[in-house]
């Protein structure tokens, strides 16, 4: 059985992991944004590398190695992709953070049930389009391509040099170039780029990672795998005081404190909950703790499925 003294030693580690992942996510967003927006000639190598490790463009371009590598990372550590290299994930974190910086308007999050029908409908639709070779829909809903389009179609026209050729400027490979070219070459395309970022940002400001856990096909795919991740967030009921601070802090709305369950399919491994918990009761661990009352141990996935 764990003790409070033992758990206290983990808090500095969790705090370091939290700030480390924030630093990595901000650096990745900055490298992508500045590289796509401000480069006068060739897109910088660091930007190109970050673009090439994005999941949906890799799948569309048949880069199976990238896809399998991310599946392996997710199966081990959970949805690190969503908390580090996805630019739209970091944009959502910033949009969610801004209205919550005021102490008078802290806007706590609340647990919500997963919207499985919506998640899987979008995923199946995107997979169907990919298999049919119809790239426009996947390129619109893909989070990386949405940010790339926003940088190339909007920010670059404002702050950088307008692209001479969409194909030459695209960093993510050739898979989405036709759709991206169409989007960039029209006013309607720019409107789509701005509207996508504004809608996702507004959703994030209101309810955290709701886009991630409702619409994003990449998030749904990773969520299927992260349910079985080796490392997951787990609540120690011997230490938990039901103070709900972790629930208030969880931007994925995935902590059901009434039943002491963390829905790992929606958890983006941000470590905000471990930082909020003063009793060290929520842990990132490879071994799920056996609860004090074994009958409370949740093994039935139906608990996480919307009724
Ligand atoms: S769920 Fe989608 S939009 Fe959200 S961080 Fe993950 S890949 Fe990006
Ligand atoms: S913050 Fe910690 S003690 Fe409070 S409800 Fe969450 S896990 Fe329990
Ligand atoms: S459970 Fe914790 S680590 Fe997971 S998304 Fe919520 S706050 Fe972040």
Image (cartoon, rainbow, N blue to C red):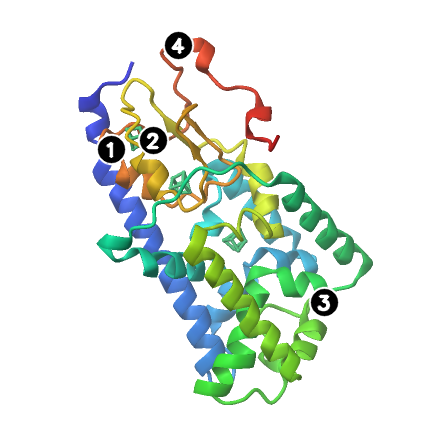
Pointers 4 and 1 in contact (C-beta within 8 Å): no
Q: Nearer the viewer, mark 4 or mark 3?
A: 4
Which residue is found at the position 29% from the left and 24% from the top?
240
Residue 40 visible in the shown view = no
- Dot 2 or dot 4, earlier in sequence: 2
- Dot 4 or dot 3, earlier in sequence: 3
Q: Is residue 177 above or below residue 112?
A: below
Residue sitting nearer the eye, 279 or 130: 279
- Ligand 2 shown in quarter: top left
Which residue is found at the position 61% from the left and 45% from the top?
221
- Dot 2 or dot 3, earlier in sequence: 3
Pointers 2 and 3 in contact (C-beta within 8 Å): no
Which residue is found at the position 63% from the left and 45% from the top?
119
State the residue position of label 2: 283
Residue found at the very far left of the displayed protein: 5
Measured in 3D between alpha carbons, the distance from the residue under mark 1 to the one under mark 2, in whole angstroms, is 8 Å
State the residue position of label 4: 293
**Residue 195, horizontal then vertical, whole percent:** 56, 70
* Element carrying mark 2: strand
Q: Left or right of 279: which side holds 152?
A: right
Q: Name which quarter of the figure residue 54 lies in.
A: bottom right
Pointers 4 and 3 in contact (C-beta within 8 Å): no
**Ligand 2 within 8 angstroms of badge 1 C-beta:** no
Residue 136 marker = 3
State the residue position of label 1: 10
Which residue is found at the position 41% from the left and 69% from the top?
31
Pointers 1 and 2 in contact (C-beta within 8 Å): yes
**Residue 43, horizontal then vertical, whole percent:** 51, 78
Q: Nearer the viewer, mark 1 or mark 2?
A: 2
Q: Name which quarter of the figure residue 55 lies in.
A: bottom right
Q: Is residue 297 above or below residue 181?
A: above
């Amino acid at each position: 059985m764990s003790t409070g003294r033992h758990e206290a030693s983990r808090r500095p580690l969790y705090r370091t992991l939290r700030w480390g992942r924030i630093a990595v996510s901000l650096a990745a967003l900055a490298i992508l944004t500045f590289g796509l927006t401000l480069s006068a000639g060739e897109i910088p190598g660091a930007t190109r590398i970050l673009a090439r490790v994005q999941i949906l463009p890799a799948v569309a371009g048949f880069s199976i190695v990238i896809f399998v590598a991310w599946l392996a990372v997710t199966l081990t550590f959970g949805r690190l992709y969503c908390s580090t290299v996805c630019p739209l994930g970091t944009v959502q974190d910033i949009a969610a953070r801004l209205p919550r910086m005021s102490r008078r308007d802290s806007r706590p999050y609340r647990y919500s049930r997963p919207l499985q029908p919506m998640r899987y409908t979008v995923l199946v639709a995107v997979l169907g389009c990919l298999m049919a070779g119809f790239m426009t829909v996947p390129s619109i809903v893909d989070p990386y391509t949405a940010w790339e389009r926003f940088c190339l179609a909007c920010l670059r026209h404002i702050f950088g040099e307008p692209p001479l050729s969409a194909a030459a400027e695209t960093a993510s490979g050739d898979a989405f170039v036709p759709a991206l070219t169409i989007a960039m070459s029209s006013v309607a395309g720019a409107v789509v780029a701005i509207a996508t970022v504004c809608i996702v940002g507004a959703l994030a400001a209101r309810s955290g990672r709701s886009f991630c856990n409702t619409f994003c096909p990449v998030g749904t795919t990773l969520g299927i795998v992260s349910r079985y991740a080796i490392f997951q967030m787990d609540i120690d009921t011997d230490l938990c005081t039901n103070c709900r601070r972790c629930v208030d802090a969880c931007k994925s709305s995935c902590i059901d404190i009434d039943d002491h369950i963390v829905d790992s399919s929606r958890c983006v491994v941000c470590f905000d909950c471990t930082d909020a918990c003063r009793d060290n009761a929520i842990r990132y661990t490879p071994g799920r703790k056996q609860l004090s009352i074994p009958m409370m141990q949740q093994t039935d996935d139906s608990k996480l499925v919307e009724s």
